[in-house]
Structure formats: structure tokens, C-alpha cells
Image (spheres, rainbow, N blue to C red):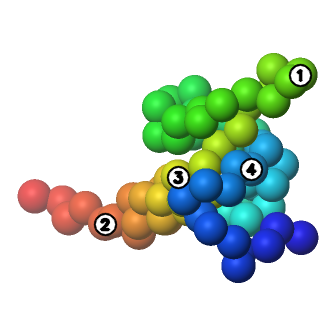
Amino acid sequence: MVDLDVDLQTTLWSVGQAAEAARVQPNVVRNWAYRGRLDVATRDRAGRPLFRAIDVIRAEKATREKARRTYLAA
């Protein structure tokens, strides 16, 4: 389980941890990064991306808000 009682500005999460915190599949986190909605903060020694916790939360919030939008037919 991901601990959300940490400093969100400096805490780094792997793809799996970010997905768990955002309650999405890891592939969604990878898509956010690929599409530029989530910046890779750094990489671990194996070259895997790490994301700032606050950025993950912001990307998740923006995605949920966009999904709630409705468009009226003109």
C-alpha cells in the first residue's frame, strides 16, 4: 500500500506505486507520461521512470475532471 502521509513534493514513486495511489492500471500511468501529462522526475538505477507524488496526484485529478465534462449538442 502506498503511504500518502509523506512529503508529496519530494517523494518519488515507481509506475506501480503511482498506479496504486491513483487507483489506475500501471499502463495508464505510462500513457500519462507518454502523452506529456506526467513528467518523469528521474530514473532509478535500472532506468525505470520515477514520478513525483504530487505530479501523479495532479495528473489523476486532471484526468478525472476531464472525464466528468459533458458537452451539449448545439
CB within 8 Å, label 4 to label 1: no
Q: Residue 68 sits in which quadrant? A: bottom left
In the rendered structure, the answer to whether residue 1 lies left or right of residue 69 reads right
Whole-Å distance between the Cαs marked 1 and 3?
22 Å
Point out the tag, 4 or 3, that comes first from the N-terminus. 4
Relative vertical location of residue 69 with respect to residue 46 in this rendering, above or below: below
In front: mark 4 or mark 2?
A: 4
In front: mark 3 or mark 2?
A: 3
Secondary element at image label 2: loop
Q: Amino acid at mark 2?
A: Thr
Residue 3 x/y as whole percent: 79, 73
Point out the tag, 4 or 1, that comes first from the N-terminus. 4
In the rendered structure, the answer to whether residue 67 lies left or right of residue 44 reads left
Classify mark 1: residues with Cα within 10 Å, few (<14), some (14-19) or many (20+).
Answer: few
In the rendered structure, the answer to whether residue 31 lies left or right of residue 27 reads left
Residue at which label 3 appears:
55
Classify mark 3: residues with Cα within 10 Å, few (<14), some (14-19) or many (20+).
Answer: some
Residue at which label 2 appears:
70
Residue at which label 1 appears:
46
